[in-house]
Image (cartoon, rainbow, N blue to C red):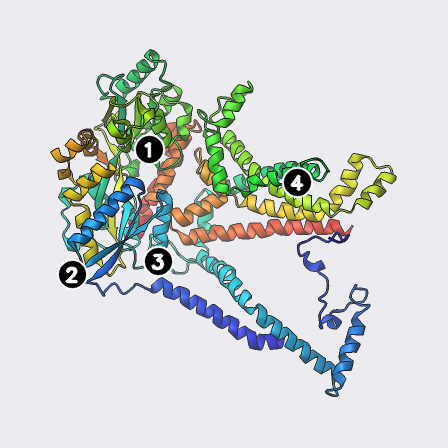
Amino acid sequence: MHMWHNKTGPVLVAAAGLLVAGLAACGSSGSSSGGQVSASAKQTIVFATQGLGSEGTATKTAVTAFEKLHPNIKVQILSLSPTSDVAFEQLTQRFTAGSSTPDVITSDVIWPAQFAQSGWLADLTKFHPNTSAFFPGQMATGQVKGGVYAIPWFINAEGLYYRTDLIKTPPTTTAQLFSDAVAAMKKDSKLKEGLAFEGDKYEGAVTAFQSMGGQISTSQLGNLNSSANNGVLTMMFDAISKYHIAPTAVSTWEESQVQNAWLSGQTPFALNWPYIFALSDGKGCMPSCAAVNGKTGWVPFPNPVGSPQASLGGDDLVVNAKSTHQAAAWEFIQYMSSNSAQIARAISAGDPPSVKSAYNSQLYAAAPYFKQEQAVFAAATPRPVTPVYTQISSQLQAMISSVLSGQSSASSALSGAAPTVKDLLSTVQSGG
Amino acid sequence: MTAKHEPVLPAGPTESAPQDGTAPLAVKPGSPASPDGPATTAHRAGGARVGGRQPRAASYSLAARDRRFGYGLVAPAVIVLLAITAFPLVYNIWNSFHHADYLFPTTFGTFAGVDNYKELFTAGLFVPSLYRTLGFTAVSVFVELVVGLALALALNRRFRGRALVRAAILIPWAVPTVVSGLLWKSMFDPQNGFVNFILLKLHLPLAHTTWLAQTWTAWGAILIADAWRNTPFMALLLLAGLQVIPNDVYEAAKIDGANALQTFWRLTLPMLKPALMVALIFRTLSSFLIFDVIYAMTNGGPGNSTQVLAYFNWFAMNGESNYGLGAAISVALMVMSLIIAYIYVTAFKTEQVV
């Protein structure tokens, strides 16, 4: 036993030491952010992005065009998971490891505040971005800590689809929406429900709540338990249990179930994202969507207490704080958010441009529905821009889910979540 | 397989004495190794006498050299194991006593004392999650044990196509948990799902249930999905245990006039104990750590009513990037797992002596 300790012990200790040192080195590599490579030097940047199918093809086309314009910069695409939560984990793992790649990253609009707070993103103010070119709601998602940490790439907002053959004029109040839905269901036996929306316990419940009028901007969250929020939650619950225009199953529905309900023609109203347009209108229409082909209208969801607020989604482009190719990364971002690149992507992949000036005759000629989309995007309202968004969203998801499933009343769910949300906000304000 | 009924896994303290050169030192009076133990010593000492005057020391250093060589051989494996198990474990425990929340870069890495553990209880979700987890573990393990044992007993009998059935029941276990969770989620869909369709066709109640929208039906759905996947594993372990019970004890019982029930309670069950213990420990611990089925099916909803400890842990780590709090939950989970394992091992051991 003694022999073993004398001989092998130190070896084990040394091996463990090496291992720790190696891991520590991984953690601290890339801290040399001082050594920036100039934009004109020959270099390769890594672009981490989601997107399969036509979106992936559109990205490749854009990258090729960029490389032609900037022969000294090569862009290597790093594919992230198409599942948002998984992509988030992939990125945080890279960031926590202190990696200097990827240089440019596609980021969901709800992430930049948290990433910037953690010191993972480069402040792009030094490149003087033209912030007024973008829809203000989405631009705000990158404007945190007094800097600009994200540039909008393409916008997304949730609005109300309605069947133009069943609903003559789109509703402007929720009362009208509900009575239209009830009337339509009475008249047409093919309709299984009057209104489809996402009520499952996931991020979509929060966007649905906000699109229907929920007041959850950063400044409103201090008073989550407001009469306005009570009204919206009660309305969502009533749609299921009082007016029976939404099936009890909506409390387990996500976008795809809402999409199926809409495309199969079983509902006159559906709350969903703009991608539905391409599926239900014109050449994108699949054989099974005959019921809605050419009968699709899209407006902001009427707000019971104020002007409509279409919950904002979409993707931003951000730059890794540890990247040594920030100047080249900025060139790339500028190209990707240019008018021509945005219109090309909108036409080939259906991604709505984040740049306001891209909504022009060239775009409308290719896809007329972008005209209706523009009206919804103008009402786009960002979810709270705060580093603790993930935690707040989790509270809101549980709150909405418990009301939709009938576990608690709107007022008790709100009064239960309000103090926690307030505490969460104050932790970042005092600690950050 | 010999007629010995020793469990296949290491049985802890009752392990037999090592049979190498060190045996003489470990010999205890009455232990099975003792009859040939002294003989070995004599033989070795006799051989060593040629070289020197102190045979005992010579044989000791020879044994020590063997040992050293042996340890040298296992060293690479030990190092790899330390790297992939001991290091993360220690690092996790370290994290649990430090501020490791990426939202607060200024305090990151500073000593936190027991703050993270305190937060477990003030965050308000830990205690209810613990109760849910324990409740689910008790129910799911009980259901899987009963059904698994019934399956194992059935598969232990001879019948046509037994090999095929044995292979077939393993299929659910071969399906990744997340996949089976998603499959069950779609089968429990109230409009297009298979479950309600069958209930409706058979004119059974609950055909219009929105399973995942209510607390108890959601738990029921999770239990079914979990049991569907894990009962085969239980059955397989118990079947292995049944197969090592020699036939002659059953014949003896028959001659003594025992009926089927008596045979099961007084013979099969006691002799199945080692296998039962393995199966129960495995299933209890993995049920206690349940995550993927719930993640895939309900996300902890409706409300927070199906949120369990592992889900809470995942959210702290990956949702909040608060590795300190996440580590504290992990450590708490680990301690509770050890307690569960300890309870099982002691409970089964005392009974085995009798």
Residue that lies at the very extreme toward the front in this rendered image: B160
Q: What amino acid type should be assigned to the residue bearing mark 1?
A: Asn
How far across and down, in percent of the image, does residue A110 sit? 29, 43
Are callouts 1 and 3 both on one chain? no
Q: Nearer the viewer, residue B50 or A122?
A: B50
Residue highlighted by disc 1: A225
Residue B163, numbered label: 4
Residue highlighted by disc 3: B107
- The CA span between labels 2 and 3 is 39 Å
How far across and down, in percent of the image, does residue B236 sit? 64, 43
Q: Nearer the viewer, mark 4 or mark 3?
A: 4
Would you say B80 lies left or right of A419 here?
Answer: right
Task: Tell me if I can see residue A218 in this picture.
Answer: no
SS type, badge 2 = loop
- The CA span between labels 4 and 2 is 69 Å
Q: Nearer the viewer, residue A152 or A64?
A: A64
Q: Earlier in the sequence, mark 1 or mark 2?
A: 2
Q: Nearer the viewer, mark 1 or mark 3?
A: 3
Residue A300 vertical position relative to residue A30 in the rendered view, above or below: above
Toward which corner of the image does residue A276 lie, by quadrant?
Answer: top left
Label 1 Cα neighbours within 10 Å, binned few <14 / some 14-19 / many ≥20:
many
Q: Earlier in the sequence, mark 4 or mark 3?
A: 3
- The CA span between labels 1 and 3 is 32 Å
Are callouts 2 and 3 both on one chain? no
Residue A40, numbered label: 2
How far across and down, in percent of the image, does residue B216 sit? 52, 30
Task: Tell me if I can see residue B40 in this picture.
Answer: yes
Q: Nearer the viewer, residue A81 or A420?
A: A81
Residue A375 vertical position relative to residue A426 in the rendered view, above or below: above
For disc 1, the chain is: A
Q: Nearer the viewer, mark 4 or mark 1?
A: 4
SS type, badge 1 = loop
